[in-house]
Structure formats: structure tokens, C-alpha cells
Amino acid sequence: MNIFEKDKEYIAGTYNRFPVHIVSGQGSVLKDINGKEYIDMGCGIGVTSFGIADEEWQSAVIGQIGKVQHTSNLYYTEPCVMLAEQLCLRTGMKKVFFSNSGAEANECAIKVARKYAYEKRGDNCYTVVTLKNSFHGRTLTTLAATGQEHYHELFRPLTPGFVSIESGDINALENLASEQIAAVMIECVQGEGGVLPVSHSFADAVGTFCRDNDILLIVDEVQTGNGRSGMLYSYMNYGLHPDIVSTAKGLAGGLPLGATLLGDKVQDVLGFGDHGSTFGGNPVCCAAAISVLSRIDDGLLEGVRKKSAYMKSQFLDADGINEVTGLGLLIGLKTIRPAGEIVKDLIKDGVLCLTAKDRVRLMPALNIPDALLKTAVEKIKAACRQA
Ligand SMILES: *Cc1c(COP(=O)(O)O)cnc(C)c1O
């Protein structure tokens, strides 16, 4: 059996992989088993923030692996505390809970919101309002939070206590029975949903609604966080003040790490025994994240915004592209040709891209060299143009 056949034989059938067998890479270039090279415009779905096998990232990881790779949360280790300090200093949040994935970071956010509301307003106040077309994860609770019916169908009953409203529908927001609502949870840019940013007026309305009604604002920064949007976190583009921020994907640059950041109001909600994770705060993952975070400074973010502006200017008015959306280096293209076909053609042409719903989604490394970005952009434009 070759690897494709063996995968089919032994791996649960949840993924529709492209027939590309990747063996190595360097920076924004991936190499397959035949030696063919690809420019990486997907970063493992926004995970490898500084590219593949980046040297600074490697030395942080290898350095920690050589000391201690895991301890559990029964003991103290430096990387997890240092990372939490950095996250708080850079966001104004007060405390951090570490987990291993985006879904878990959201699960923690929801637990915190429920406990806060329960203690403050009693046992009828637990509903979390999310947006239609959102994506918050694959556990039964984060699926319930995900405002897309088709993900729900086969897995009922889901965790109760979630309602979703249309992004942008300020009336729907204001008509909610606020006394029963614990939190509103949004993505500032719906990544999986098609790279759709919320409008500034809606984000303002959500912020005001939450503040006026003592409802917690949770921002899901799993995909948009850690420099991806051109700011450290995407809510900073909107002037929002979330009570809880969840993040994961790009945080540790390629190792599994989720973080739930807790603001002023909720910093002391979780007490001993309320929540936990065996792997959460793993020293290797946290050492990787410290290295990633330390590089996301003003200069790097300026570079992200410049690369973003370059990409948008290239795609705007390009043949076969109807709309360009997104923030920073999370860019969506509404194309005339089906996005899936474009992505397949681009694989042949040596560029790896993502889709999101009916759009092409681009998430290159935050430090992708301009020359590689230019080559990729030219090829993407050509693939969108083809009849
Ligand atoms: C990917 C994603 C998740 C889920 O993260 P996992 O690490 O796959 O559990 C949650 N929210 C958003 C916005 C995401 O993009």
C-alpha cells in the first residue's frame, strides 16, 4: 500500500485530503515526497505563524525539549508562567488558562461565562449568544456555539443554552432577553465562515449591549489572533474591550496550544477544581509561543499590514475575482470559478491555498518574503482568471 491507500485504510474518514505528501519545508516553502516545492499560503490553517522549521522557533522548542518536555499542572514550570505574563501585559487581560486547541479555549470561555452569570444572576442566566455562520469548534458544546445548522444535524442533542443571530443585525441583538444572557461570543472575522469581517457598527453595538447589560463579551481569536489580523488580536482593530479572549492556531507556531484570556471582571471566576487540562500549558508548546509572541512586535505587524495591502491591491479588480475580504494576512477571495477548483489547479502550479465556504482563503506566514508572496499572488491571479 502507498501512503494514500494506507491512510484510507487506517485513518478515520473525516478528512478529504489533497493528494500531496509533504515531507519537509523551510519558511514559506513546502516540499513533497517527489521533491516538488510549494509556496505555503495556508500555514496549516493559520498555525505556522513564522513558516516551516523556522530557526528561531526551532531553537526555542529544542531548547525546552532538552530540559523538560512535560510535567502536568501539578508543578510549576517557567515557560507557562512567562507566556501568561506576556499575554496579559500585551492585552491588559488579567489571567490565562492554557489548553491544547481552539475548541478547548472556547470551552473554557463558555464555562467561565456560565459560572460568572450563575454566581451573579442565578441559574436561569446561562445563554450564550453567537453569530450565524460562525465557527467555534468541534466538541458538542462548541458545535452548539457554532451558528451553522449543518454541523449540528447528526449530533443532537447538543449542549443547550446557545442562540445565534445574524452578524450585523443590531435589532436582533437589542431584542434579546438580556436577563437570561451570560455572554455574547463573536469572531471579528469569520474565518471558516468565508473570511467575513463584522462591521464596525455591529461590533460597537455588541460592545455597548454587553457593557450596558453586564453581559460578558467573548472574542474568539483562535484564527484571527497572534498577529494574523495586522494587530496582535483582531478585536484591537475594532476598539473592543472583551472580557474573555480565546486563541490557539498560530499561538505556538505549529505546536498545539490553546489559551483563554480572562479580563478584570472574570479573572477570579475559576477556582481550584473548576477546570483543568493534563497537557495544557505544556512547557515545550509555551516556549514555542513565547518565541512567537516576542517576534510579533510593531515592526512585524507593520509588515503584516503592508503585505495585506499589497495582496488586496493585487486582487482588487483582478479578472475572475468579485470580492476581496479580510484583515491582515487572513484574506478571502470571492471568485467566479469555484474556489475548490482554483485551489486544485494551484497545487499543480506549486501554491498551497485554503478555501472557506465558497471562497479562496489565504493565510501566508506573517514573515513570508515579499518575493515569494509576489510569485504566489501572480499564480493565484492566473488561476482565478482561467476560463
Ligand atoms: C479553528 C477554529 C476553532 C477550533 O480550533 P481547533 O484547534 O480546531 O479546536 C475555533 N474557533 C475558530 C474561530 C477557529 O478558526
Image (cartoon, rainbow, N blue to C red):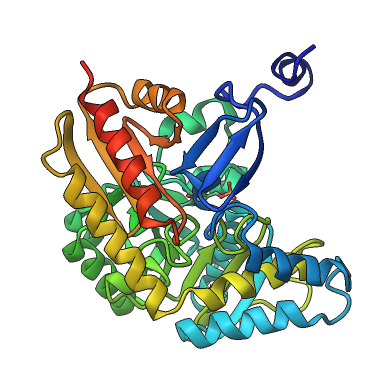
Q: Quadrant of the N terminus?
A: top right
In the picture as drawn, the residue positioned furthest to the left comes out as 317
Instruction: Say above or below: 324 vs 33.
Output: below
On the image, which quarter does residue 272 sit in?
bottom right
Horizontally, residue 149 falls left or right of residue 119, namely: left
On the image, which quarter does residue 4 sit in?
top right
Q: Position of residue 292 (x, y in %)?
A: 57, 69
Is any part of residue 319 visible from this angle? yes
Q: Position of residue 120 (x, y in %)?
A: 51, 79
Q: Position of residue 48 (x, y in %)?
A: 56, 54
Q: Quadrant of the C terminus?
A: top left
Is any part of residue 194 visible from this angle? no
Horizontally, residue 23 falls left or right of residue 384, namely: right
Residue drawn at 86 percent across, 66 percent down = 70
Q: Closer to the camera, 79 or 217?
A: 79
Residue drawn at 21 percent across, 51 percent down = 312
On the image, which quarter does residue 271 sit in?
bottom right
Instruction: Say above or below: 313 vs 233.
Output: above
Q: Position of residue 102 (x, y in %)?
A: 58, 55
Instruction: Say above or below: 13 vs 163.
Output: above
Instruction: Say above or below: 139 vs 88.
Output: above
Q: Closer to the camera, 361 or 279?
A: 361
Residue drawn at 56 percent across, 29 percent down = 36
